[in-house]
Image (cartoon, grey):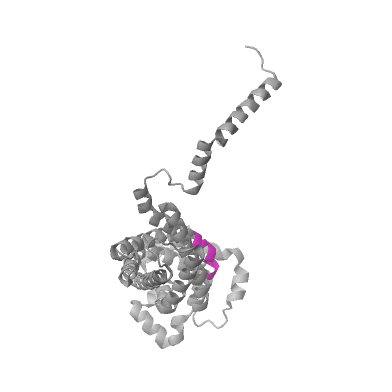
Amino acid sequence: MAAVSTNELNKVILQRAASTRAVLKSPASQELIRKSFRNPLANIDRDTRRKLAAPIAGFTSAAIEITAVWPFEYAKTQLQLNRGNNDFKLAQHMRQRGLAIYQGLTPLLIGAPMQGLLRFSSLEYFNQKFADPKTGKLSVASGLSAGIAAGILESCLVVTPMETVKTRLIHSNKGLLEGAKYIYNAQGVGGFYKGLGATIAKSSSNQGLRFVIFNQYKNTILTEPNQKLTPLQALGGGMLAGFLGAIGNTPVDVIKSRMQDMNAARYRNMFHCAQTMLREEGVGSFYKGLIPRLGRVLPGQGIIFCSYEAISSALKK
C-alpha cells in the first residue's frame, strides 16, 4: 500500500472541509440550523408542541427562578427559624456562612422544576377551560381553580418533602443525603410529610392569589384576542402577583416553616402552631421573614412569569 504524503493528506482534509462548509452554507442547511436553535421542538406537530409548552416552560422557568433567588429564600427561612433569638444577626450569619448558604438548595433544584411543571400545566388547563371563547379573557375562576389544583398536587407530590428537607438542612447545617437519612431514621417516611396541611394551605392560597392577579393583569394589559405580553410586561405582572400574594399568605408560610423545622414535634397541627405563636410571640411573629421573602418573591415571580411567557410563546410557534 503506497504511503500518503503529509501534503496530500492536508490537501484531502482541506477539500473535505471546504465541501462541509459549502453544505453548511447552503440555504436548506441554514434554515434547518435556524429552526433548531429557534425551537428545539420545531419538528414536532403544532398540537403536540402546544400541549408540551406549559410543562416544559414551567419546568425551565422554575429552575431559573430558584437558582437566581436562593439567597433570599435562605435568609427568609433563617429569620423564621430563629424566633425569639435576639442575638441572631442575619447579615453577620450570611457573611460567616459564605457559599455554604447553598447547602439547602439541592432539594429545591430537584423539586422546584417539577413544582413549576405541575403549577403551570394546571394554569394552562384551567385557563383553557374557563377563558371566554369569544374574547379570550381569563376569569377569576380559572386562576383560582388553577391555584387550588396546583397547590394540592404540588404539596402532596413535591413541595412538602422538598420543603421539609430544605428547612431541616438549613436548620441543622447537614448535607442533602445526611439530612434525608436523619429525617428517615428519626421519623420514617412520615417525617418528610410534616406540615402537609399547612403546605397545602400555603401553596393553594399562594398560587390562587398569584394566578388570579396575573390573569387579571393580562386582561387589563392585553386588548387584542391573540396579543401576547412583552417580556417587560410579563416581568411587571409577575412581580405584582408575587408582591400581593406574599402580603396575603406570609402567615401561612411562617406556620408551614414552623411545622417542618427541627422542633415541629411540639405542634399538634397548624392551628395549634398558630395559637402557640400568637400566645408566645404575638401577632408580629406571623410576618417574620416578610422582607427577605419579598426580596425573593418580587424578582423571583418576575423571572418565573417572564421566563414562562417567553418560553411558552416560543414553543407554541
Is residue 241 or residue 2 the one in the foreground?
241
Determine if residue 292 is in view: yes
Query: Which residue is rendered at x = 60% and y = 63% of the image?
Result: 99
Query: Which residue is rendered at x = 60% and y = 27% of the image?
Result: 16
Residue extending farthest to the top is: 1
Determine if residue 169 is in view: no
| Residue 305 placement, left or right of 144 | right
Identify the image quadrant of residue 313: bottom left
Total numbered labels placed on residues in the image: 0
Is residue 196 or residue 7 the one in the foreground?
7
Residue 291 spot, x, y in % from top left: 52, 78
Is residue 177 or residue 153 the one in the foreground?
153
Query: Which residue is rendered at x = 45% and y = 54% of the image?
Result: 314
Instruction: Give the residues drawn in magenta, as a range.
Output: 64-72
In the rendered image, the vertical position of residue 180 relative to residue 22, given as above or below: below
Residue 225 spot, x, y in % from top left: 37, 63
Is residue 54 or residue 272 the one in the foreground?
54
Identify the image quadrant of residue 269: bottom left
Residue 150 spot, x, y in % from top left: 34, 65
**The N terminus: image quadrant:** top right
In the rendered image, the vertical position of residue 315 relative to residue 174, given as above or below: above
